[in-house]
Image (tube, rainbow, N blue to C red):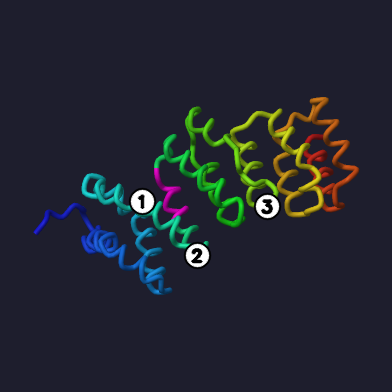
Amino acid sequence: MPPRPFLGAEPWPRYQSAHAAVNARGFLRRSRSSTSCRVLKRYYNLLGDSALTKSSPRALAGLSRRVELASHEDFLEMFDHRFRLTIIRYWARLRPTTHRVRRIMQYIRGMSKYDDVVTAALANLLVTWRLSPSAAGSALRFQMIDDRRPGGFVAKLVLLAKYGTEDRLSDFILTTETYWSSSEFLSRQVIASWSLLSPSSARTQALEGRLTRNLLRSVNELFDFFRGLRC
């Protein structure tokens, strides 16, 4: 009988359940049934439970490594976007490293071509993490991200808003104007990042003057809202 790694009221069966789920993962993934998908999602939620992992980090260290490796395989092989979102929520609980950021950026490049929801969720993961300067640099390598789709566009926008410079953000907004200015949803995402641009900058004022002539009425109302806040 192995020693109980949890203290107090922490249930040992949860630890056994996590091990059992990892061991059965190959069978569950091959079956591809709705039931197996629910079981896999449950075990990612279980292993992402901070109360479970903090109780005995040594006991779970080896298991956590196996789960992380498995999560990348499952992310690529299970095509249900809700399942992928579950894995992204699990990744959000991990410590950000440069290696992890590079892998997420690789997935963003691939997903931006066909899955807007997952692409935006991956970018939001990088925004949620507190990245080191080197990791933040990896998050700004946008080669091959398809910004002609909403997911890729939003991914670039939020990453520039969090980790880029004011010049890079304003350049991106201006060069993609013909794409996002005809969409109310995308226009609102752009204007939401407007507070990051210096209102006294001649570049920002020129950009605002150009955009207000072409944007949808509801989006121009957001410009008026920002002006009201600055008064």
Residue in the foreground of this view, choosing between 193 and 28: 28
Say whether disc 2 or disc 3 marks the residue closer to the N-terminus. Answer: 2
Q: Do the residues labelled 1 and 3 touch (CB within 8 Å)?
A: no
Instruction: Report the number of numbered marks.
Output: 3
Relative to 17, say whether 144 is above or below. above
Measuring 69% from the left and 34% from the top, which residue is drawn there? 169
Q: In this view, does 131 lie to the left or right of 50?
A: right
User: In the rendered image, which quarter is residue 229 located in?
Assistant: top right
Say whether disc 1 or disc 3 marks the residue closer to the N-terminus. Answer: 1
Residue 122 pos. (x, y %): 53, 49
Helix, strand or loop at label 3? It is: helix
Measuring 18% from the left and 52% from the top, which residue is drawn there? 5
Residue 220 pos. (x, y %): 85, 47
Residue on which disc 3 sits? 150
Relative to 138, say whether 66 is above or below. below
Q: In this view, does 130 lie to the left or right of 226?
A: left
Q: Which quadrant is home to the N terminus? A: bottom left
Q: Which quadrant is home to the C terminus? A: top right
Residue in the foreground of this view, choosing between 9 and 170: 170
Q: Magenta includes 49? A: no
Q: Residue furthest left?
A: 1
Q: Which disc, if any, is residue 80?
A: 2
Q: Magenta includes 91? A: yes
Q: In this view, does 133 lie to the left or right of 36?
A: right
SS assignment for the magenta stretch, majority: helix
Crowding at label 2, few (<14), some or many (≥20) Cα neighbours within 10 Å? few
Residue on which disc 1 sits? 50
Crowding at label 1, few (<14), some or many (≥20) Cα neighbours within 10 Å? few
Crowding at label 3, few (<14), some or many (≥20) Cα neighbours within 10 Å? many
Residue segment shown in magenta: 87-94
Helix, strand or loop at label 1? It is: helix
